[in-house]
Image (cartoon, coloured by chain):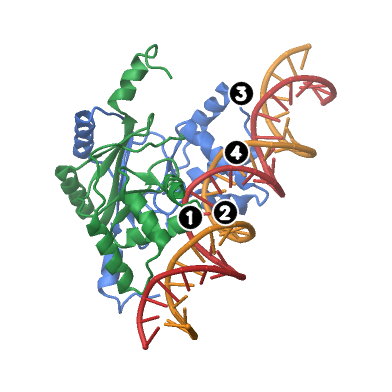
Chain colours: A green, B blue, C orange, D red
DNA sequence: CGACAGATGAGAATGAGAATCATAATCTCT
DNA sequence: AGAGATTATGATTCTCATTCTCATCTGTCG
């Protein structure tokens, strides 16, 4: 199954200065350097919403500076992830996707296999049950992955009314 | 995180003739052919327990017939999957792992990130909650992925008693 | 400024898996 | 059993995401 994920366009996001500050101290704390490219990529990332692939990020970054290399984007996203400012997700489809993680609660995902739309949800009850299951098996859970794949409302509609809404 | 998954050694499995029969009719039904290699690979797969990577299968198969090619193992596992006799899992670590699927209930997984041990569980309540969540978001779920990562009992013990049990 | 550690970009390397292709094996029909 | 048609095999190549390498460049700190 080859899915063409698209971004979810939800609330507009203000470019968080908190993120920049946290990144700055993270970088300073371990002798890394602050560079033009890094800033540009970070800026680009935080000015988008949704779950971005590296490819998409590279494309957006190159619009601002065509000399940006893909390797740098990979490297930068790794730093952001390590600093807790982004989190990497591995949905079906083979690419890693990143989402902003600053001050975000843990959440899981609903993914439309038709249009690639990604919705998020939290469910405390499910988490509790997971912990209980783990406990019963003697496991200590460090992280988990819960992804629900299927059709979003729009795509279900489209499939049951195939005569309308064809591109 | 690079995890070295190992097989879970649970109940011994008798080499299911039911599986062979089902495969035979599947193969017959679509004009495929029954070959020595295919049989060998299928046999090898069903004589193992747990969640096997293609690599591991290739290795085991080559022990019986060194001329077996990796491509054939990939192809055969795809056929088994299509026939509903195996199911492919994509845990962290990058490789696809296959488990026998004949007459098996749906289940999810607990994965030890230290020793690679994989335990299985079913939880009807979690499934119900997932469906409810999906419904609230207008999604129709076709499949899902629930994986709990952490330390199994043995590895937790080992880590809290680091002076014992070091290799 | 100057040295040096860290960063960059291009391209090569990697690894899992799919595709290709010439050859080989199997099935069907008689 | 033999022929012909078709599928399978194994080696190799290809793809794709990601990482690595390396020569060069750039912050940073004294």
Chain name for mark 3: B
Chain name for mark 2: B
Q: CA distance from mark 1 to mark 2?
A: 42 Å
Query: Mark 2 or 3 closer to N-term?
Result: 3
Q: CA distance from mark 1 to mark 4?
A: 48 Å
A81 or B98: nearer the viewer:
A81
* Element assignment for label 2: helix
Q: Name the quarter where the C terminus of chain A is drawn.
A: top left
Residue drawn 48% across and 41% down? B15
Q: Position of residue B60 (x, y in %)?
A: 56, 52
Find residue B98 and report its image quarter: top left
Q: Which residue is mark 1?
A: A68
How many callouts does the rendering have? 4
Q: Is residue B68 visible?
A: yes
**Same chain assignment for discs 4 and 3:** yes
Q: Position of residue B11 (x, y in %)?
A: 37, 49
Query: How busy is the neighbourhood of tag 2: few (under 14 within 10 Å), some, or many (20 plus)?
Result: some
Q: Which residue is mark 2?
A: B59
Q: Which residue is mark 4?
A: B38
Query: How busy is the neighbourhood of tag 3: few (under 14 within 10 Å), some, or many (20 plus)?
Result: few
Task: Verify CB contact (< 8 Å) between mark 4 and mark 2.
Answer: no
Disc assigned to residue B31: 3
Query: Mark 4 or 2 closer to N-term?
Result: 4
B101 or A146: nearer the viewer:
A146
* Element assignment for label 3: loop
Chain name for mark 1: A
Q: CA distance from mark 4 to mark 2?
A: 15 Å
Q: CA distance from mark 1 to mark 3?
A: 52 Å
């Amino acid at each position: 199954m080859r899915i063409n994920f698209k971004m979810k366009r939800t609330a507009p996001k203000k470019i968080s200065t908190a993120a920049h500050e946290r990144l700055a101290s993270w970088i300073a704390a371990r002798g890394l350097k602050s560079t033009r490219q890094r800033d540009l990529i970070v800026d680009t990332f935080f000015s988008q919403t949704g779950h971005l692939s590296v490819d998409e990020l590279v494309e957006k970054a190159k619009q601002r500076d065509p000399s940006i290399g893909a390797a740098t984007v990979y490297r930068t996203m790794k730093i952001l992830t390590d600093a807790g400012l982004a989190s990497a997700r591995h949905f079906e489809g083979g690419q890693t996707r990143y989402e902003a993680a600053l001050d975000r609660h843990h959440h899981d995902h609903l993914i439309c296999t038709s249009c690639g739309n990604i919705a998020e949800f939290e469910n405390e009850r499910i988490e509790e049950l997971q912990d209980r299951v783990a406990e019963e098996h003697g496991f200590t859970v460090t992280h988990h992955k819960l992804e629900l794949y299927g059709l979003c409302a729009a795509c279900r509609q489209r499939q049951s009314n195939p005569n309308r809404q064809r591109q």
